[in-house]
Image: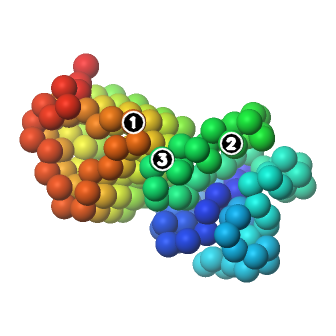
C-alpha cells in the first residue's frame, strides 16, 4: 500500500484521515503542519514536520502522494503551488468516502476529497483540489473549477459552474444553470 502524507492537522484533517482510512487505498505516514509542534498527533497520526521538510520526508518515508487537508480554498491552492515547487514528483491523491455516490462519466481532479454521503451525477467535472462535503450534491454536467468547494448539504441543479476557489456555503441551493457550466 502506497504511503501518503496529509498536509494539515486541524478539524478538516480529521475528516480527511477518516476517509483515507475507510477507503483503504493508502497508508498515512503522518501529517505535515506548520502551526503545530512535531510529534503531536491527530487521530493517532503524528506531525512529522513542516512544509519545508517535505523533500526530506518524501525520501525518509518513501512517500508516493500527498493530500492537502486545509478547508480554506485559497490557502489550499497556495499550499498546492508550494508543494509542486518543493516536491514536483509528489502527486496529489484523491480520497472518496465509500458512502459517496459517484455516477458514470465523472472526472475527478487530483487532490480532491469527496466526503460521506456526497452525490456526484453523470458528466460532472471536478477540478484539482476540490472539496465535496458531507451530503453535498453536484448534479449532471456541472463543473467545479480547481480548489472550489461545496459545504455540507450544498446542492446544485444541473449545468452549474463553480469558479476557481469559490465556496458554496452550508445548505445552499444553486438553481439549474447557475454560472453557465456544463459541457
The label on residue 74 is 3
Question: What x and y, as percent, mark residue 74?
Answer: 48, 47
- The residue under the point 19% across, 51% down is 155
Of callouts 3 and 2, the N-terminal one:
3
Q: Which residue is mark 1?
A: 164
Secondary structure at numbered mark 1: loop
- Labels 1 and 2: the sequence-earlier one: 2
User: Residue 82 bears which disc, if any?
Assistant: 2
Q: Identify the residue shown where x is 67% and y is 69%.
A: 35
Q: Report the residue at 27% width, 51% height from top.
A: 168
Point out the tag, 3 or 1, that comes first from the N-terminus. 3
Q: Does residue 81 appear left or right of residue 111 in this picture?
A: right
Q: Residue at x 34, y 44 (%)?
A: 166
Vertical comparison of 15 with 111: above or below: below
Q: Are marks 3 and 1 in contact (CB under 8 Å)?
A: no
Residue 43 drawn at (x, y percent): 61, 78
**Viewer-side residue, 84 vs 106:** 84
C-beta proximity under 8 Å, tags 1 and 2: no
Considering every residue shown, the one lying at the far left of the view is 175
CA separation in Å, label 3 and label 2: 13 Å
Q: Position of residue 66 (x, y in %)?
A: 66, 49
Amino acid at each position: 500500500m502506497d504511503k501518503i502524507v496529509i498536509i494539515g492537522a486541524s478539524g478538516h484533517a480529521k475528516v480527511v484521515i477518516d476517509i483515507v482510512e475507510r477507503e483503504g487505498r493508502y497508508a498515512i505516514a503522518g501529517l505535515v503542519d506548520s502551526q503545530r509542534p512535531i510529534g503531536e498527533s491527530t487521530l493517532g497520526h503524528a506531525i512529522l514536520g513542516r512544509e519545508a521538510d517535505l523533500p526530506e520526508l518524501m525520501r525518509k518515508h518513501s512517500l508516493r502522494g500527498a493530500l492537502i487537508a486545509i478547508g480554506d480554498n485559497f490557502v489550499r491552492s497556495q499550499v498546492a503551488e508550494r508543494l509542486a515547487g518543493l516536491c514536483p514528483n509528489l502527486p496529489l491523491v484523491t480520497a472518496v468516502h465509500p458512502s459517496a455516490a459517484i455516477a458514470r462519466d465523472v472526472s475527478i481532479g487530483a487532490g480532491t476529497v469527496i466526503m460521506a454521503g456526497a452525490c456526484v451525477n453523470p458528466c460532472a467535472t471536478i477540478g484539482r483540489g476540490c472539496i465535496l462535503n458531507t451530503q453535498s450534491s453536484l448534479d449532471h454536467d456541472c463543473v467545479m473549477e480547481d480548489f472550489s468547494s461545496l459545504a455540507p448539504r450544498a446542492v446544485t441543479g444541473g449545468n452549474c459552474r463553480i469558479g476557481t476557489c469559490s465556496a458554496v456555503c452550508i445548505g445552499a441551493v444553486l438553481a439549474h444553470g447557475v454560472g453557465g457550466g456544463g459541457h
